[in-house]
Protein backbone atom coordinates (compact mmCIF):
# COMPACT_ATOMS: atom_id res chain seq x y z
CA UNK A 1 0.00 0.00 0.00
CA UNK A 2 1.29 3.49 -0.77
CA UNK A 3 1.93 5.89 2.12
CA UNK A 4 -0.89 8.15 0.92
CA UNK A 5 -3.27 5.18 0.89
CA UNK A 6 -2.07 4.13 4.36
CA UNK A 7 -3.01 7.63 5.58
CA UNK A 8 -6.53 7.10 4.16
CA UNK A 9 -6.05 10.00 1.76
CA UNK A 10 -9.22 10.24 -0.33
CA UNK A 11 -8.80 9.68 -4.07
CA UNK A 12 -10.48 12.35 -6.18
CA UNK A 13 -10.98 11.69 -9.90
CA UNK A 14 -14.02 13.77 -10.85
CA UNK A 15 -13.62 12.89 -14.53
CA UNK A 16 -13.12 9.17 -13.84
CA UNK A 17 -10.01 7.21 -12.83
CA UNK A 18 -7.58 7.03 -15.76
CA UNK A 19 -6.41 3.45 -15.10
CA UNK A 20 -2.78 2.36 -15.35
CA UNK A 21 -0.39 5.07 -16.61
CA UNK A 22 3.04 4.58 -18.16
CA UNK A 23 5.56 6.54 -16.11
CA UNK A 24 8.66 5.88 -18.25
CA UNK A 25 6.94 7.09 -21.43
CA UNK A 26 5.17 10.05 -19.82
CA UNK A 27 5.74 13.49 -21.25
CA UNK A 28 4.71 16.97 -20.25
CA UNK A 29 4.09 19.61 -22.90
CA UNK A 30 4.53 23.29 -22.15
CA UNK A 31 3.05 25.65 -24.71
CA UNK A 32 1.45 29.07 -25.07
CA UNK A 33 3.16 32.33 -24.17
CA UNK A 34 6.80 31.27 -24.33
CA UNK A 35 9.61 31.45 -26.88
CA UNK A 36 10.71 27.81 -26.57
CA UNK A 37 7.61 25.60 -26.21
CA UNK A 38 8.47 21.91 -25.90
CA UNK A 39 7.72 18.54 -24.37
CA UNK A 40 9.72 17.16 -21.49
CA UNK A 41 10.13 13.40 -21.13
CA UNK A 42 10.01 11.68 -17.74
CA UNK A 43 13.79 11.18 -17.91
CA UNK A 44 14.47 14.80 -18.81
CA UNK A 45 12.36 16.00 -15.90
CA UNK A 46 14.19 13.64 -13.54
CA UNK A 47 17.55 15.08 -14.58
CA UNK A 48 16.58 18.67 -13.71
CA UNK A 49 17.17 20.24 -10.25
CA UNK A 50 14.70 18.71 -7.79
CA UNK A 51 13.26 20.06 -4.58
CA UNK A 52 11.49 18.47 -1.65
CA UNK A 53 9.10 20.66 0.30
CA UNK A 54 7.19 20.02 3.51
CA UNK A 55 3.68 21.11 2.76
CA UNK A 56 0.00 20.35 2.99
CA UNK A 57 -2.51 19.51 0.29
CA UNK A 58 -5.84 20.84 1.54
CA UNK A 59 -9.13 19.91 -0.06
CA UNK A 60 -12.10 22.22 0.01
CA UNK A 61 -13.90 19.15 1.40
CA UNK A 62 -11.77 19.69 4.55
CA UNK A 63 -9.42 16.76 4.63
CA UNK A 64 -5.72 17.47 4.22
CA UNK A 65 -2.46 15.59 3.96
CA UNK A 66 0.89 16.88 5.15
CA UNK A 67 4.25 15.51 4.11
CA UNK A 68 7.33 15.79 1.93
CA UNK A 69 6.52 16.40 -1.72
CA UNK A 70 9.28 16.08 -4.33
CA UNK A 71 9.43 17.48 -7.83
CA UNK A 72 10.47 20.44 -9.93
CA UNK A 73 9.75 24.04 -9.14
CA UNK A 74 7.44 25.50 -11.74
CA UNK A 75 9.87 28.42 -11.99
CA UNK A 76 12.54 26.01 -13.31
CA UNK A 77 10.26 24.80 -16.11
CA UNK A 78 9.14 28.32 -16.99
CA UNK A 79 12.69 29.47 -17.51
CA UNK A 80 13.45 26.37 -19.64
CA UNK A 81 10.67 27.33 -22.08
CA UNK A 82 11.54 31.03 -21.98
CA UNK A 83 8.23 32.29 -20.69
CA UNK A 84 7.17 35.63 -22.16
CA UNK A 85 6.29 38.60 -20.00
CA UNK A 86 2.66 38.48 -21.24
CA UNK A 87 2.15 35.19 -19.37
CA UNK A 88 -0.10 35.80 -16.35
CA UNK A 89 -1.74 32.39 -15.72
CA UNK A 90 -0.80 28.72 -15.98
CA UNK A 91 -3.44 26.25 -17.10
CA UNK A 92 -2.88 22.62 -16.10
CA UNK A 93 -4.43 19.79 -18.13
CA UNK A 94 -4.83 16.28 -16.72
CA UNK A 95 -4.68 13.09 -18.78
CA UNK A 96 -7.75 12.87 -21.05
CA UNK A 97 -7.94 16.69 -21.09
CA UNK A 98 -11.31 16.83 -19.32
CA UNK A 99 -9.97 18.17 -16.02
CA UNK A 100 -8.17 21.51 -16.13
CA UNK A 101 -7.48 24.30 -13.69
CA UNK A 102 -5.57 27.58 -13.86
CA UNK A 103 -3.47 29.49 -11.34
CA UNK A 104 -1.92 32.97 -11.35
CA UNK A 105 1.74 33.26 -12.27
CA UNK A 106 2.74 34.78 -8.91
CA UNK A 107 1.50 31.66 -7.08
CA UNK A 108 3.22 29.37 -9.61
CA UNK A 109 6.50 31.15 -8.91
CA UNK A 110 6.37 30.56 -5.15
CA UNK A 111 9.03 28.19 -3.89
CA UNK A 112 6.72 25.36 -2.83
CA UNK A 113 4.71 25.23 -6.08
CA UNK A 114 5.87 22.04 -7.79
CA UNK A 115 5.31 19.58 -10.54
CA UNK A 116 5.50 16.70 -8.10
CA UNK A 117 6.19 13.00 -8.58
CA UNK A 118 6.81 11.73 -5.04
CA UNK A 119 5.30 11.92 -1.56
CA UNK A 120 7.44 10.99 1.47
CA UNK A 121 10.04 9.47 -0.85
CA UNK A 122 7.57 7.26 -2.73
CA UNK A 123 6.66 7.78 -6.41
CA UNK A 124 3.03 8.83 -6.87
CA UNK A 125 0.79 6.14 -8.33
CA UNK A 126 -2.23 6.71 -10.58
CA UNK A 127 -4.64 7.06 -7.65
CA UNK A 128 -2.79 10.11 -6.35
CA UNK A 129 -1.91 11.83 -9.62
CA UNK A 130 1.21 10.00 -10.76
CA UNK A 131 3.38 10.10 -12.73
CA UNK A 132 3.29 13.93 -12.45
CA UNK A 133 0.89 16.28 -10.75
CA UNK A 134 0.67 19.95 -9.96
CA UNK A 135 1.25 20.55 -6.25
CA UNK A 136 0.13 24.02 -5.20
CA UNK A 137 -0.06 24.04 -1.37
CA UNK A 138 -1.04 27.74 -1.25
CA UNK A 139 -4.51 27.09 -2.73
CA UNK A 140 -7.37 24.61 -2.31
CA UNK A 141 -6.55 21.13 -3.62
CA UNK A 142 -8.58 21.45 -6.82
CA UNK A 143 -5.77 23.63 -8.23
CA UNK A 144 -3.36 20.67 -7.84
CA UNK A 145 -4.33 18.89 -11.06
CA UNK A 146 -3.37 15.22 -11.12
CA UNK A 147 -1.57 13.23 -13.86
CA UNK A 148 -0.85 16.29 -15.94
CA UNK A 149 0.11 16.14 -19.61
CA UNK A 150 0.15 19.81 -20.54
CA UNK A 151 0.70 23.28 -19.12
CA UNK A 152 -0.55 26.22 -21.18
CA UNK A 153 0.93 29.64 -20.51
CA UNK A 154 -1.86 32.17 -20.80
CA UNK A 155 -2.41 35.91 -20.77
CA UNK A 156 -5.85 35.68 -19.16
CA UNK A 157 -7.74 33.43 -16.74
CA UNK A 158 -10.08 30.61 -17.79
CA UNK A 159 -12.20 28.80 -15.17
CA UNK A 160 -11.45 25.09 -14.96
CA UNK A 161 -13.40 21.92 -14.26
CA UNK A 162 -14.38 22.68 -10.66
CA UNK A 163 -14.41 26.45 -11.06
CA UNK A 164 -17.16 26.09 -13.70
CA UNK A 165 -19.08 23.98 -11.17
CA UNK A 166 -19.04 26.59 -8.44
CA UNK A 167 -15.66 26.44 -6.69
CA UNK A 168 -13.96 29.83 -6.41
CA UNK A 169 -11.52 30.97 -9.08
CA UNK A 170 -9.03 32.23 -6.49
CA UNK A 171 -9.16 29.02 -4.38
CA UNK A 172 -7.89 30.93 -1.40
CA UNK A 173 -7.80 28.57 1.57
CA UNK A 174 -10.18 29.73 4.30
CA UNK A 175 -9.55 29.02 7.95
CA UNK A 176 -11.64 26.23 9.42
CA UNK A 177 -11.58 22.71 10.70
CA UNK A 178 -9.28 20.32 8.85
CA UNK A 179 -9.18 16.56 9.01
CA UNK A 180 -5.77 14.95 8.44
N1 LIG B 1 -7.43 15.24 -12.80
C1 LIG B 1 -7.90 15.54 -11.59
N2 LIG B 1 -7.11 16.23 -10.74
C2 LIG B 1 -7.57 16.56 -9.50
C3 LIG B 1 -8.88 16.22 -9.09
C4 LIG B 1 -9.69 15.50 -10.02
O1 LIG B 1 -10.85 15.16 -9.74
N3 LIG B 1 -9.16 15.17 -11.24
N4 LIG B 1 -9.35 16.59 -7.85
C5 LIG B 1 -8.67 17.73 -7.22
C6 LIG B 1 -9.05 17.88 -5.83
S1 LIG B 1 -10.59 18.52 -5.54
C7 LIG B 1 -8.18 17.61 -4.81
S2 LIG B 1 -8.58 17.98 -3.22
C8 LIG B 1 -6.91 16.90 -5.06
C9 LIG B 1 -6.93 15.59 -4.32
O2 LIG B 1 -5.75 14.87 -4.49
P1 LIG B 1 -5.75 13.29 -4.19
O3 LIG B 1 -6.84 12.66 -5.01
O4 LIG B 1 -4.37 12.85 -4.58
O5 LIG B 1 -6.01 13.09 -2.73
O6 LIG B 1 -6.69 16.64 -6.43
C10 LIG B 1 -7.15 17.63 -7.32
N5 LIG B 1 -6.75 17.26 -8.66
MO1 LIG C 1 -10.74 18.68 -3.22
Image: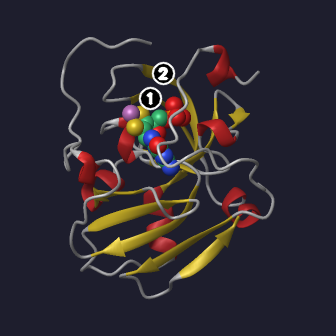
Task: State the quadrant of the C terminus.
Answer: top left
Q: Nearer the viewer, residue 17 or 54?
A: 17
N-term mark: 2 or 1: 1
The relative height of residue 139 versus residue 159 in the rendered view (above or below) is above
- Residue 5, quarter of picture: top right
Residue 137 visible in the current orientation: no
Q: Nearer the viewer, residue 79 or 32?
A: 32
**Marks 2 and 1: CB-CB under 8 Å?**
yes
> What residue do we see at 43% from left, 60% from top?
92
Label 1 crowd bin: few (<14), some (14–19), many (20+), radius 10 Å: some
The relative height of residue 104 versus residue 27 in the rendered view (above or below) is above
Q: Which mark is residue 55?
A: 1
For numbered disc 1, what is the local secondary structure? strand
Q: Is residue 60 left or right of residue 136?
A: left
| Residue 16 percent location from the top left of the image | 56, 46
Q: Is residue 175 left or right of residue 66?
A: left
Q: CA distance from mark 2 to mark 1?
A: 6 Å
Q: Nearer the viewer, residue 78 or 62?
A: 62
Residue 68 visible in the current orientation: yes
**Residue bearing the label numbered 2:** 66
Q: Quadrant of ligand 2?
A: top left
Amino acid sequence: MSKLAAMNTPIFWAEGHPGALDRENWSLEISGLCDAPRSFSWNELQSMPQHTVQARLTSVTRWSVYGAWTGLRLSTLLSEVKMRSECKFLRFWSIGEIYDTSIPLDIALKERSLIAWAFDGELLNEDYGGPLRAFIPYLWGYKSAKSIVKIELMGHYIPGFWEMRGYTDSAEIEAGVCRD
